[in-house]
Image (cartoon, rainbow, N blue to C red):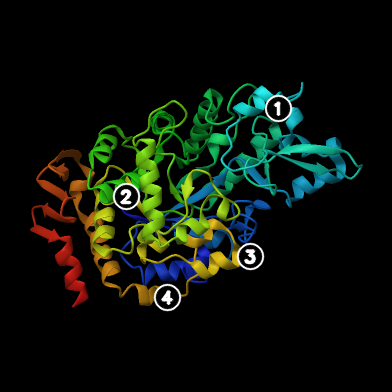
């Protein structure tokens, strides 16, 4: 994976197009900005109950987008990340429908997890209380088989997402088939979606237990043997992220987005500085994704202290709601369906009250933090909350999942803040200093982030007291200094 800024996008939502159209956008409107692209689920169907994360057929490209050869064509020019949806598949899948029709006589019976398969002696109240729930409600959904038998299937997320039994031959074959399809289609990086929930064991939380680490480790080795890199998607306590980083090729730095917001809101970067001193170096950095802004990643979990205190987390969440004029409140928690208990749904630009300077400071910190940066399509274009879509679907995360046309991209690319952001992306992509050693310091509300590679250096100084930042780069060809307020002002002329 190139050490360049990567794009995260839905194929059909960035330009209301297909895979061929996306490649054209990457080659034209977004030319020279991205070394790779995370193609959010493009499997059949893209418009299920969870925007593609509930595939009926994980091995089939939705025909409205194209086919696997179109994926391969993008892979000829860009690094591609794709989601391996480890934990579940759609209740509408051929496999699950066969189970409903034939019960235990179905060849796919062992592909799915039931309450009985995990708790053959029954689920005690004590065991049930230990199970970690990412969303409200039961982790089981009752389905009636053709013969009238009622069976409780494990559904971690929604009733339409039936959990896979990854221990069985059928479960292993399913995952292997998808891995081989990825390999044949030039997918370079695999995002292990919801991998922390894949292993269920009585008497445990059924989330990121010891057996989960072993499973992720085994899956990473399989992908590596096919020449692919793995990225674990885990929203949890920050120490879990550090532990899982030792077992896979890459992890997300999900603590970074809330910590940057906290630093800008409070004008205190001490928590951010502490995290950057201990954070995994083999990480992908994000500020925004197709999901919400993670809170659990920076906060306390149970009796484990977080990077931020409970009071700081409350202040952070409430400030996001204020900055977005209450829009994030309409999309978060019990206010909208398909909720995540650990995320705030809002564009990052609105979380910062559409303040262009603060937004560029946030992106600068992301680009200078250790790891490979990814930028979500709405973040690239400084999009605001998609309230019309949210009101239509009542799905909280749709507030940050708008459908755009090429004309929308062209218009947004003319915004001063977007022009300035594109300059920062190009700087991050071209400076060899970012392939060197990282160091930092924090004093008197000034954060210094420095990269040095031989004679090449790149330095970022953020002054939280006055909300400004400057970047200086030095190499054999030039020395350059960029003050973010001046960069923004230049593009407003």
Number of the front mark, 2 or 4: 2
For marks 2 and 1 on the same chain, the one whose residue lies earlier in the sequence:
1
- Residue underneath mark 3: 63
Horizontal side of residue 150 vs 401, given as left or right: right
Q: Which mark is residue 408?
A: 4
Residue 311 quadrant: top left
Q: Name the spot of residue 168 as percent of width and height, x first.
A: 69, 31
The residue lying at 37 percent from left, 33 percent from top is 306
Q: Name the spot of residue 417 as percent of width and height, x first.
A: 27, 67
Q: Mark 1: which secondary structure?
A: helix
Tell me if I can see residue 285 in this picture. no
Contact flag, marks 1 and 4 (Cβ < 8 Å): no
Q: In 3D space, how far apart are the residues under numbered discs 1 and 3 (Cα atoms)?
A: 37 Å
Q: In 3D space, how far apart are the residues under numbered discs 3 and 2 (Cα atoms)?
A: 40 Å
Contact flag, marks 3 and 4 (Cβ < 8 Å): no
- What crowding class fits label 2: few (fewer than 14 Cα within 10 Å), some (14-19), or many (20 or more)? many
Q: Mark 3: which secondary structure?
A: loop
Q: Mark 2: which secondary structure?
A: helix
- Residue underneath mark 1: 118
- Residue underneath mark 2: 261
Q: In 3D space, how far apart are the residues under numbered discs 1 and 4 (Cα atoms)?
A: 49 Å
Number of the front mark, 3 or 2: 2
- What crowding class fits label 4: few (fewer than 14 Cα within 10 Å), some (14-19), or many (20 or more)? some
Name the residue nearer the viewer: 455 or 181.
455
Q: Name the spot of residue 411 as percent of width and height, x first.
A: 36, 77
Contact flag, marks 2 and 4 (Cβ < 8 Å): no
Horizontal side of residue 195 vs 164, given as left or right: left
């Amino acid at each position: 994976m190139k050490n360049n800024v990567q794009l995260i996008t839905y194929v059909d939502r960035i330009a209301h197009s297909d895979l061929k159209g996306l490649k054209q956008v990457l080659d034209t409107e977004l030319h020279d900005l991205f070394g790779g692209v995370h193609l959010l689920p493009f499997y059949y169907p893209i418009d299920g109950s969870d925007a593609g994360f509930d595939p009926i057929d994980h091995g089939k490209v939705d025909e409205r987008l194209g086919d696997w050869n179109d994926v391969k064509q993008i892979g000829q020019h860009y690094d591609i990340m794709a989601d391996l949806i480890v934990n579940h598949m759609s209740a509408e899948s051929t496999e699950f429908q066969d189970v409903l029709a034939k019960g235990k006589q179905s060849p796919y019976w062992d592909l799915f997890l039931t309450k009985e398969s995990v708790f053959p002696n029954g689920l005690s109240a004590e065991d049930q209380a230990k199970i970690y729930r990412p969303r409200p409600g039961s982790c089981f959904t009752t389905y009636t088989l053709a013969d009238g038998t009622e069976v409780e299937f494990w559904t971690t997320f929604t009733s339409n997402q039936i959990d896979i039994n990854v221990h069985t031959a059928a479960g292993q074959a399913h995952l292997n088939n998808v891995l081989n399809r990825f390999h044949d289609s030039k997918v370079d990086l695999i995002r292990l979606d919801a991998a922390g929930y894949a292993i269920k064991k009585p008497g445990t939380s059924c989330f990121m237990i010891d057996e989960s680490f072993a499973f992720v480790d085994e899956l990473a080795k399989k992908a590596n043997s096919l020449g692919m890199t793995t990225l674990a998607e885990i929203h949890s306590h920050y120490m879990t992220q550090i532990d899982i980083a030792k077992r896979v090729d890459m992890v997300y730095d999900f603590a970074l987005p809330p910590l940057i917001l906290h630093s800008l809101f409070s004008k205190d970067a001490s928590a951010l500085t502490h995290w950057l001193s201990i954070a995994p170096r083999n990480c992908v950095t994000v500020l925004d994704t197709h999901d919400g802004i993670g809170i659990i990643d920076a906060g306390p979990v149970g009796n484990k202290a977080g990077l931020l205190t409970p009071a700081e987390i409350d202040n952070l969440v409430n400030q996001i709601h204020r900055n977005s004029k209450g829009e994030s409140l309409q999309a978060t928690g019990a206010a909208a369906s398909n909720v995540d208990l650990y995320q705030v749904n809002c564009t990052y630009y609105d979380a910062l009250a559409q303040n262009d300077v603060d937004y560029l400071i946030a992106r600068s910190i992301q680009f200078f933090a250790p790891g490979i940066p990814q930028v979500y399509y709405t973040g690239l274009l400084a999009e605001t909350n998609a309230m019309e879509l949210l009101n239509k679907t009542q799905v909280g995360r749709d507030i940050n999942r708008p459908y755009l046309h090429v004309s929308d991209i062209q218009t947004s690319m003319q915004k001063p803040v977007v022009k300035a952001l594109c300059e920062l992306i190009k700087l991050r992509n071209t400076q060899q200093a970012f392939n060197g050693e990282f160091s930092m310091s924090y004093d008197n509300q000034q954060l210094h982030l420095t990269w040095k590679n031989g004679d090449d250096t790149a330095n970022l100084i953020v002054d939280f007291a006055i909300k400004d930042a400057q970047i200086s780069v030095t190499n054999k060809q030039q020395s350059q200094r960029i003050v973010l307020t001046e960069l923004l002002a230049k593009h407003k002329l």
